[in-house]
């Protein structure tokens, strides 16, 4: 059993995941190579905002088995094709003023470590890179980060009955959003991998 990073575009791998693959901590696989055996044989899956969701949703039965068997999925991006029962499609913000992009940590979570969400609102002075909407939470999920005055759940974690878990970040790939001055980009990617590999308990366990 191993963690599979699903590479979904023609560009290079993120630098941290090149190192993780060299260390044999993760298997890199193109999304056009996914099949039922890959999904059910993995202990964890990491997707990016470039995921081919049509293909992924076509693997619903295998994903259901994967999650019912205790697998963990770290999902980045906008859910446009719900791939298991209980998920809903992405909802963009109606308003996009600066206040609408403000972030608040609602529940501490080991993936975020020492990062302050206020330091992740803007990138090079432009707000909104963290996300501009949310994937609606399924029943039983826990909101981790709130977006804007309404505190939309831009990050949430969902523990499923069979022991599987989904971490949803409704924006750009989370490890790409660390404040540059903090030097936290690779440690954040490391924590994403560790969560997916089962090194951290869920927030409601």
Image: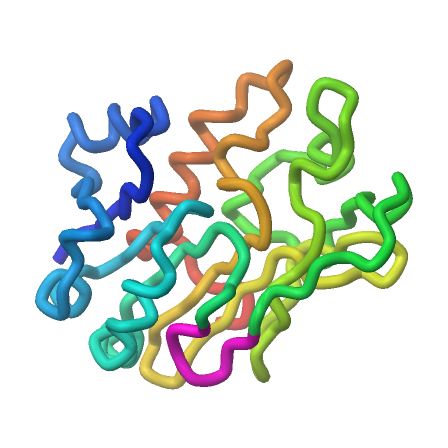
| Magenta segment boundaries in residue numbering | 82-88
Quarter of the picture containing the N terminus is: bottom left
* Residue at screen point 31% across, 64% down: 56
* Residue 177, position as x, y percentages in the image: 58, 32
* Residue 28, position as x, y percentages in the image: 19, 40
The residue positioned farthest toward the top in the image shown:
181
* Residue at screen point 77% across, 57% down: 93
Q: Is residue 138 above or below residue 170?
A: below
How many marks do you count on the picture?
A: 0
Give whichever of 11, 178 is nearer the camera.
11
* Residue at screen point 18% across, 45% down: 29
On the question of residue 64 being in view, the answer is yes
Apparent side of residue 185 relative to residue 107 in the rendered image (left or right): left
- Residue 76 in the magenta stretch? The answer is no
On the question of residue 199 being in view, the answer is no
* Residue 158, position as x, y percentages in the image: 50, 71
**Chief secondary structure of the magenta portion:** loop
Tell me how the rendering is colored. rainbow
Q: Which quarter of the figure has residue 162?
A: bottom left
* Residue at screen point 14% across, 52% down: 33
Apparent side of residue 24 relative to residue 83 in the rendered image (left or right): left
* Residue 131, position as x, y percentages in the image: 66, 46
Q: Which quarter of the figure has residue 193?
A: top left
Q: Is residue 115 above or below residue 184?
A: below
């Amino acid at each position: 059993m191993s963690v599979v990073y699903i590479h979904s575009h023609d560009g290079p791998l993120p630098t941290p995941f090149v190192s993780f693959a060299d260390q044999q901590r993760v298997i890199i696989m193109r999304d056009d190579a996914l099949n039922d055996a890959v999904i059910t044989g993995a202990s964890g899956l990491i997707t990016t905002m470039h995921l081919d969701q049509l293909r992924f949703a076509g693997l619903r039965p295998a994903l259901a088995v994967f999650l019912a068997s205790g697998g963990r999925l770290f999902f980045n991006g906008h859910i446009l094709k719900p791939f298991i029962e209980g998920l809903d499609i992405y909802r963009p913000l109606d308003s996009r003023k600066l206040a609408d992009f403000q972030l608040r940590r609602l529940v501490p979570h080991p993936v975020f470590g020492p990062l302050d969400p206020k330091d992740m609102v803007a990138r090079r002075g432009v707000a909104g890179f963290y996300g501009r909407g949310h994937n609606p939470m399924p029943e039983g999920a826990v909101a981790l980060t709130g977006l804007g005055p309404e505190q939309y759940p831009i990050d949430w974690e969902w523990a499923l009955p069979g022991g599987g878990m989904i971490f949803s970040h409704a924006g750009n790939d989370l490890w790409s959003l660390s404040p540059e001055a903090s030097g936290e980009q690779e440690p954040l990617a490391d924590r994403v991998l560790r969560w997916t590999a089962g090194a951290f308990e869920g927030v409601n366990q």
